Structure formats: C-alpha cells, structure tokens
Amino acid sequence: MHHPILELRGVSFTYGNGAVLRDVDLTVREGGFYGVVGPSGAGKTTLLRLMEGSLEPAAGTIERRAHGPDRLRLAVVPQLEAIDWNFPITVEEVVLLGTAGDGRRLPWASRDMREKARGVLDQLGIGELFGRHIRNLSGGQQQRTFIARALLRRPDLLILDEPTSGVDVGTRHDILHLLHELNHEGIAIVLTTHDLNAVAAHIPMLVCVNGRIVAEGTPEQVLTPIVLRDLYGAEMIVVNREGMILVGDAFGATVDPHERDEHASGTPAAHFGQVPAHEHGADADHVHEEAETGR
Amino acid sequence: MNWFSDPLTHGFFRHGLAAGVIGGALCGLVGVYVVLKRMSYIGHGLSHAIFGGAAIANVWALNFYVFAGAWGVLSALLINGVSRRRKIGADAAIGVITTASFALGVALISRAHKFSINLEAALFGNILGVTIEQLLVLLGVLVFAGVVIVLRYRELLFATFDPEAADAYGISSRRTDTLLAIMLAATIVAAMQALGVTLIAATIVIPAVIARLLTDSFAKMLVLSTSIGALSGAVGMYVSYYVDVPPGAAIVLMLAAVFAVLYGATAFGARRRLQALGSIDDHIDVAGPTVGADRS
C-alpha cells in the first residue's frame, strides 16, 4: 500500500455565506490518480485550493507528508480560463517559472535550467514552441505549457483544475494519456472535471463532491445511478459495456442508433446512444442490454 | 544658442531634469507591475490616499517621507486586505479607502488653516523647485526598487502572472503583494513633490502601457517602460522650458500623445496584415497586444 502524502481530516471551508465544504476526510496516496467530480459550485476548486495550501480550512486539519526529508513538492495547473493570455510572456518563460520558488536569486535562468525546460517541452511534444507568446497557442498546447511548468518543479503531487475543459475530444484524449504516463512515472495526480465518461475510462479513483464527500472509490464503485442522483440531483443512466462504463442523461436524449421505424414513436435514447427499454417488432435484428437507471 | 545646453545653465532646470529622468524611470519600472496586475486604479487612488498622510505630517510637523510612506503602505495593505474579501471588489475598496484618506487630509488642512508650499507641491507637483534631498530620496527609491526587482524577479513575475498558483510553488502571494505595495507607496511618496498627486498616476501607468504595445516579453517590457519613463521626463522638461507649460503637464501630455500614436499605428498595422491575408475576422483583435483587457 502506498503511503499517504496528503490527508484532509474533518476539513470545512466557508467564504462567509454558509459552508462550501463540510467535514471532508480525504487521503491522497503516493502515486495515486484521483478525479474529483461534482456539479458546478460543489466545492471542487475550493477542495483543490485547500490541497494546494492557497486556502486555509475553517475547521479540520490538512497534513502534507513527503517520502523523504524534503517537504511535499506540489505543482498546480490552473484552469485555462483563469489565465491572462495577453500577459507578456513566452512559453519558455512560463515553463521556467516552475523553478521560481527554488530560491535562486538571479533573475535569469541558468543554462542547466533552460536545458531542463527545453527537455520537458520536448517530452510533451511542444519543444519547437518555446519562444512563442502564450496567446498564439492552441488549447492543447496551452495546457501542455502549464503541465511543463509543473513538471519542471519535479512534483510529488500534480493538481489540475479542469484540464480537459474547453478542448476538443482529441486533445482531451492526449492530455489524459499524458497524465497517465506521468502517473506511471510516480507522480500522484488529482484533477477536477465535469466529463464523467472520460474519468470512467481514464482515472482509477474518483471522489464525488457536493459540499461534502458523497462517494469515493473506483469508477465501478462510484458511477452508479444512485450515487450520481445523490451527487447531481438528476437521473442518470449508467451502462457497463464490456468493462467500459458509459454515463448519460436519462432525460432529453434524442440520439437513437437504430432505424427509427423499428421502434415505438417518441422513444428517448441516452446521449451516448444507449436506448432505454422500449418495444419493437419480433423481427428486429438486435437485442438491448439492460440500461441501469436506478429508478 | 544651443537648444540642448542652454536650459542646463539654470540650476533649477538641472534639478528638474534629474528629477524628471529619475522619477520617470522609477514610475516606469514600478508601473509594469501596476499595469499587469490591473492595479492602475490603485496607483491613482494611492496617490490621493498618501496626500492624507502628507497633510497629517505637515500639520503635526512629522517627517514627510517617513509618515507619508508609512501611511501609503498602510493604505495599500488595507486595500489589498479589503479586496481579498469577495463581497467587496478592489475598485470599491480603493474608492472607499483612498477618498476617505484624501478627505481626511483636506479636513485637517482646513482645521489647521495651514497650507504650506510643500503641500501645494504634493498636490500639483513642483519639479522645478525640487531639492537635492528630494533628488537623493528619488534616487534611493529607484535603487531600492531596482534591487528588489532583480533579486525577486522570478517570484514577482510568477505572482503577477498567476497569483492563484503562486503559493503552491513556494511563493507567498501575500508577501509579494506586500512588497509591491511598499514599492508603489515609496514611489508615490518620493515622486509626489516633483509630479504631484494629480499627475503621478499617469507617469506610472502610461510608460508601461506604451511598453506593452511594443513587446510581448516581460523582461523587455521592464526595460522599455523604465526607458520610456526616463526619456519622457527629460523630453517633457525641455518641452516645458520652450513651450512654457508646467513640466508635469508636459510630461504627461507627451506620454499620452505617444500612446495615442502607437495605439493607432499598431491597430492600423494589424488591420493591414489581416487585409493582406485576404480576410478580416471580426473576432480577431486588430489593436495588437492589449492591456488590461480580458481574454477574448
């Protein structure tokens, strides 16, 4: 069992108008990979900021423990929306900021530091962009730039706030694949996201937050209609198809992979194409798997 | 007659020129952080807040630099503290604290019936009457700010660019905010007698804004803004001498004119480049690098 590197015990937090988080107990283990999910305003970003240390809990304790004698090394990748993209700074300058807290007093980077920065950028596949202004990057490149800044810090724990928001499906896949690789190299990762299907496919441990920890465990344990209804206050359909978990809205879905004339009119289907129980003729060329709705 | 050397035969002009160059460089240097942290209104408000401290120092015969400086730092920290609370934005915090401080200064002066030349200079600036002592203070603050920026360059850059993540990277955003507040307050106190409360904000903000239009590099922006500030101080003094307008007004008007020309030129250049590409997308920013605007 990997030892805990970050422990929250009975943590509560408020911005002044009622508690945003109440009585949170959470353990992040060395080399773990955690996805924090929950509705908007559930306290996901607040939870990350408590983990980072940029917010202090109103109640409870947060312990950060490193494996060796040094303090736990944290690195943060912010939401892209929070960045001022007109700030006069290049990709290389952003990446070199990863060592800004290391106590070097000279304003310019050493040759060694610059080589390391170039190495990390090459590793992430954006080595040729080092001199470019950050405004002139795609969403995926911007995300990789901030991940490169985090990696230059050689973190024990990497915290990412919605790294897959605002990017296309291909970029989202690339980013999650990259995070997997980094996790395999031993870096513990905690990220927030709204994309339940992506976390189900890529992230081994989920933490469901809605002002408190609603559930915690593997996607199989956590992504159930009952937990999701408790979390989002809405009915969700969950399908486990050959080990792949798919989550969709139970209402308002219109996509039907079948020929429409095979089915009774007005039959709703899930967003990912799974069709809830419905009837069709005996000569239909398919059968339906059970879609679990929790109703 | 030599247009360059003739004014230098006057001692008051030499002192004024030195104050213009040193004060301009100092305001330009500190202004980069003020503009990039979107604190331009703080620069304006803080100069008014410090006037309150200057009035107290004047009425109670306290050391102007020590008391007004401490008052300025306190005001800046108070603004930071109040604006950290989510219910009250930074602009509202500045509006309350700085105008209250300014009003306190006006009330004290009115009660004491004491309005000295120094206080008038603090309000409107008196660059031609600047003393050796004031010049040395300006130079000292410039050296202080320069040393702080060199030694804390990367921390200040991080905290200015991405303050939310700074603490996680071992950089105290509270400490860097305090450091910037001290630098800004010291700059305003040192330059106040030369440039005046009413004009000092422009000399802090405009050089940095011009520099931003010229470069996409933070390090170059620091150098450019400092140079533009110093140059505008020198040129403004000569313009004032020959056109017979107050030096502070000449410096600010010249900076504003340079900004207007550059802004127009960058917008025109961007539009030409887009036209050359064959199409203009309404969503593309044609004004070049923007300052103080959110990502669009």
Image: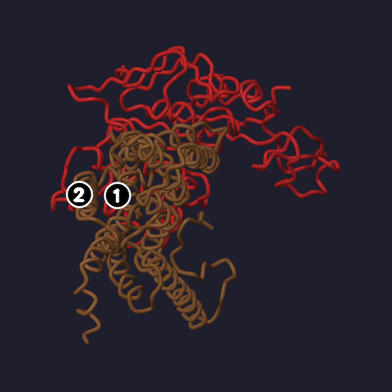
Q: How far from the left and from the top, in percent, is residue B196?
A: 39, 55
Which chain is drawn using red? A
Q: Is residue A225 visible?
A: yes
Give above or below for A268 relative to B275.
Answer: above
Toward the viewer: B107 or B94?
B107
Where is B205 relative to B2, above or below?
A: above
Residue linked to disc 1: B190
Q: Is residue B270 left or right of residue B16?
A: right
> Which of the pair A212/B285 is nearer the observer?
B285
Q: Amino acid at mark 2?
A: Gly
Chain of residue at mark 2: B
Instruction: Estimate the x, y position of residue A243 in percent, counting from the top left.
Output: 52, 31
Residue A148, visible in the rendered structure:
no
* Residue A290 coordinates in the image, percent (x, y): 68, 29
Q: Colour of chain B?
A: brown
Residue that lies at the very extreme toward the left in this rendered image:
A111
The three-letter code of the residue at mark 1 reads Ala
Q: Residue at x 58, y 28 (%)?
A: A42
Provide the chain ID for the residue under circle 1: B
SS class, disc 2 = helix
Establish if B199 lies above or below B137.
Answer: below
Residue at x 33%, y 53% (from the top left corner): B193
* Residue, disc 2: B140
